[in-house]
Image (tube, helix red, strand yellow):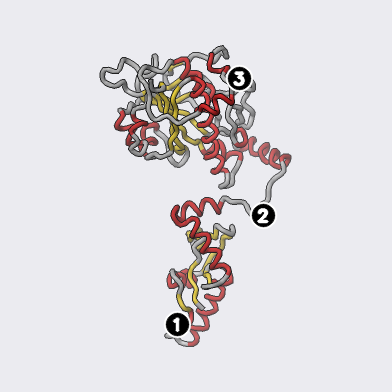
Amino acid sequence: MRAKVAEHATLFYSDGAVVWDDYLHHRQFAISETAELLCRKFTEFTDVDELLAPLAEGDRVALRKVLDELVEAGVLIVEGSPEHERERRLLAAWRDWGPSARHFHFASRTLADAPYQGSEEHDAVLDAKLAEQPPPAPFRSLGRTAVLLPRLDGTSKWSSAGLLDVLLSRRTTREFGPGPLPLTKVAELLAVLGGPSPARSRIGRSGTVFKTSPSGGGRHPVELYAHVRVPAAGGGNQTVEALEPGWYHYDGLAHALEPIGVTWGPAEMTAAAGDQDWVGQAPLVLAYTGVLERTRWRYDTSRAYRVVQMDVGHLSQTAYLVATAMGFGIGFTAALRDELVEQALGCDAYHEVVLGLSVLGPLPE
């Protein structure tokens, strides 16, 4: 018999024990020190009898028993077995993305027998949680002197554009024309993206809020930041009307931009965007981050992290459509150096994660 360690699991230490985390089948169990040491001998297919042959009979019997238990538990895979074929297919499909990607996907993939709470049971759990652990605020203010923005009044010409026409006109733009972006339109775009829905603006007692884009459980973890580019030499005084260059945080409840105190030049923006020059040349860049605690307060399973990623997709599509209706050019990128963005925005990467950028400017002439 030839066997090797399964590649659909990882090991970690917990309370002094070595834990086998089989993310493919959603199983976790402790393994002995002897089992852990044996696993190191089976990093590739190895003949069990040949490995044990030099040992004394008593040791061979004892270790063979441990090895049989590891095979039974799925820690070791026997060459040519159905488990071997399933792993071969798994690795063929996922190997290029490395172990961390497949670990997250399959650990958060629900199986046929996954338990789900009914709505009444879930509501009861949240009611009890409210009494002991208040939800995080759905909107954030940095408490700084802010630039108050003009309010959306519903009379803007862009808002009457036909939905199908806008959908069919949507394009990713990587070149931008001259001239500043109007502050009124930028303000309206931010209000549509990050403000409470005018039709249902009340914040629920559990921190749920309604916006124009959907969000799992109404948690809206995505936080908005805006960067106004420094004008190019000889290119006019402003890239967005009435706004000084630099990074801002958008306070969706107050409908205001709070200066962060950091201004990037085109080279810094380009570097943060994975060396994409077109991002560095854009008059306006919107950064999306995910405040994880908003979603985690309601959904405490790892699958909820998928929902945070979905939310930025919903929101960035809304940005695409509104910008298109306004006559702006827009693109989106997630090819970032997250750490540079975190440093500029002051994000704690353990609690607020960088998700992507929307990149805007006038359409080229």
SS class, disc 2: loop
Question: Residue drawn at (39%, 39%), measured in percent from left and top?
Answer: 336
- Using the image, tell me which numbered label, if any, was put on residue 198: 3
Q: Amino acid at mark 3?
A: Pro
Q: Residues within 10 Å of mark 3 (few under 14, many from 20)?
A: few
Question: Residue drawn at (31%, 15%), measured in percent from left and top?
Answer: 236
Question: Residue drawn at (53%, 34%), measured in percent from left and top?
Answer: 221
The spot of residue 66 in percent (x, y) is: 53, 75
Q: Amino acid at mark 1?
A: Glu
Q: Amino acid at mark 2?
A: Ala
Side of 107 where 360 appears, left or right: left
The quarter of the image holding the C terminus is: top left
Q: Are marks 2 and 3 in contact (CB under 8 Å)?
A: no
Q: Report the front residue among 13 and 3.
A: 3
In the displayed structure, 97 sits above or below 243; it is below
Question: Residue drawn at (40%, 40%), measured in percent from left and top?
Answer: 335
In the displayed structure, 304 sits above or below 226; it is below
CA separation in Å, label 1 and label 3: 73 Å
**Nearer-N-terminus badge (2/1):** 1
Q: Residues within 10 Å of mark 2 (few under 14, many from 20)?
A: few
For label 1, the residue is: 50
**Nearer-N-terminus badge (1/3):** 1
In the displayed structure, 233 sits above or below 220; it is above
